[in-house]
Image (cartoon, rainbow, N blue to C red):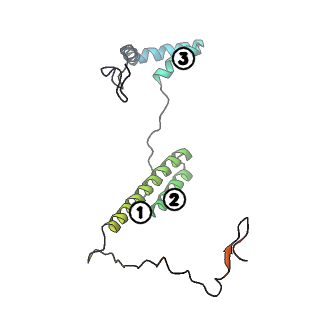
Amino acid sequence: MPFQKGQSGNPAGRPRGSRNKAAMALQDLLEHDAESIARTVTHLAKDGNIAAIRMCMERLLPPLRHEPVTCDLPALDTAADAVAAASAIVAAVASGDLTASEAADLAKVVDLHVLALGSAAFEERLARLENGPAHAGDGVEWTQVQAPNANRPLPTGPGRAGLSCVGGGGTPGARQ
């Protein structure tokens, strides 16, 4: 019997994120005995047992993750404020307060914020356009423009007659 699409074959199975009991017990053991294991590892290091050192130290001292950085940035209320923020980031790198990779990550955050500001401004303008003509006092001046008649001939006059685009590498607008 085939399974239904999008439905688990074992709905009462192990929940996501649950951990193996044996793994949890080993982790508890390592956490409670971390100090004595560290002492043993130190003795093994003095004796030259590299494999034991590597195995235990990977558990006791996980690799460092990115730590939060502090950098004084100006308020980013408009897209134009991004220039001042970029200048502050460059100054922090120059003074040694930030590494180049930290500055690059911070610049991505500033760029993302500027994109969000632009999206919000675009939605606001679009909403005003979709809501129709302006009302008195809303600060927006609307003018009605008449569309050109599609049936009338294109203007010809001095300098316009005989213009064409020559295909195959010719110069656009060259006279024939």
- In the image, 32: left or right of 156? left
Residue 104 position within the rendered picture, expressed as x and y whole percent measured from the top left = 53, 48
The residue labelled by disc 2 is 87
Task: Determine which of the numbered discs, if any, sits on residue 26 in the image.
Answer: none
Instruction: Report the residue at 67% width, 78% height from top.
Output: 163
**The one of 105 and 141 positioned closer to us in this rendering:** 141
Residue type marked 2: Ser
Residue 48 position within the rendered picture, expressed as x and y whole percent measured from the top left = 60, 13
Residue with the most extreme bottom position: 158
Work out whether mark 3 precedes mark 1 in sequence or the reverse, and give the earlier one. Answer: 3
Residue type marked 1: Thr
**The one of 18 and 101 positioned closer to us in this rendering:** 18
Under tag 2, what secondary structure?
Answer: helix
Q: Residues within 10 Å of mark 1 (few under 14, many from 20)?
A: few
The residue labelled by disc 3 is 53
Instruction: Report the residue at 30% width, 20% height from top.
Output: 12
Task: Determine which of the numbered discs, if any, sits on residue 78 in the image.
Answer: 1
